[in-house]
Amino acid sequence: MSQRDVQQVISRVAAYADFRRLLSLNPEQALKSYDLTTEEKGALKDIAKSHFKLDVDAKGYIRLVS
C-alpha cells in the first residue's frame, strides 16, 4: 500500500480530464504504474465517475471530502 501513490492518482484525477477519462474507461491501464493494493484500486476506479471535493490537511496531504 502506498498513501503517496493513492494521493498521486487523486491529484491526477482532479487535474487532468484525460486521466479521469482513462481511469473511467480503462482503470487497469491508468493504474498500472502505481503500487496499489487491490482494495485501493477498487476504490480509485469509481472516483473518476463520481463528484467529489479535495481538501489538503495540515500536513499537506490531499484527502477526499464527501
Image: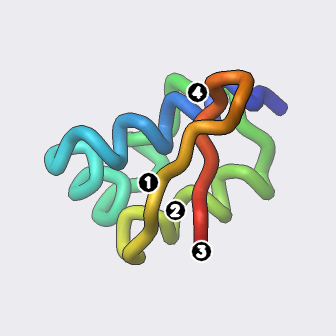
Q: In terms of sequence position, does the residue under pointer 1 or pointer 2 come before the other?
A: 1
Q: Nearer the viewer, residue 43 or 55?
A: 55
Mark 4 → mark 2, Cα distance in angstroms = 13 Å
**Residue 24 location, x and y as percent?**
33, 64
Mark 1 → mark 2, Cα distance in angstroms = 6 Å
Tag 1's secondary structure?
A: helix
Q: Which residue is mark 1?
A: 27
Mark 2 → mark 3, Cα distance in angstroms = 16 Å
Q: In terms of sequence position, does the residue under pointer 2 or pointer 3 come before the other?
A: 2
Q: Nearer the viewer, mark 1 or mark 2?
A: 2
Mark 1 → mark 4, Cα distance in angstroms = 11 Å
What's under tag 3, amino acid-wise?
Answer: Ser
Which disc, if any, is residue 66? 3
Q: Nearer the viewer, mark 4 or mark 3?
A: 3
**Residue 44 location, x and y as percent?**
57, 57
Tag 2's secondary structure?
A: helix
Q: Nearer the viewer, residue 58 or 38?
A: 58
Q: Residues within 10 Å of mark 1 (few under 14, many from 20)?
A: some
Q: Which residue is mark 4?
A: 34
Q: In terms of sequence position, does the residue under pointer 3 or pointer 1 come before the other?
A: 1
Most extreme residue toward the left, as rendered? 18
Tag 3's secondary structure?
A: loop
**Quarter of the N terminus within the rendering:** top right
- The structure residue drawn at horizontal position 77% and vertical position 27%, both measured from the top left corner, is 2
Q: Are marks 1 and 2 in contact (CB under 8 Å)?
A: yes
Q: In terms of sequence position, does the residue under pointer 4 or pointer 2 come before the other?
A: 4
What's under tag 4, amino acid-wise?
Answer: Tyr
Q: Nearer the viewer, residue 57 or 26?
A: 57
What's under tag 1, amino acid-wise?
Answer: Pro
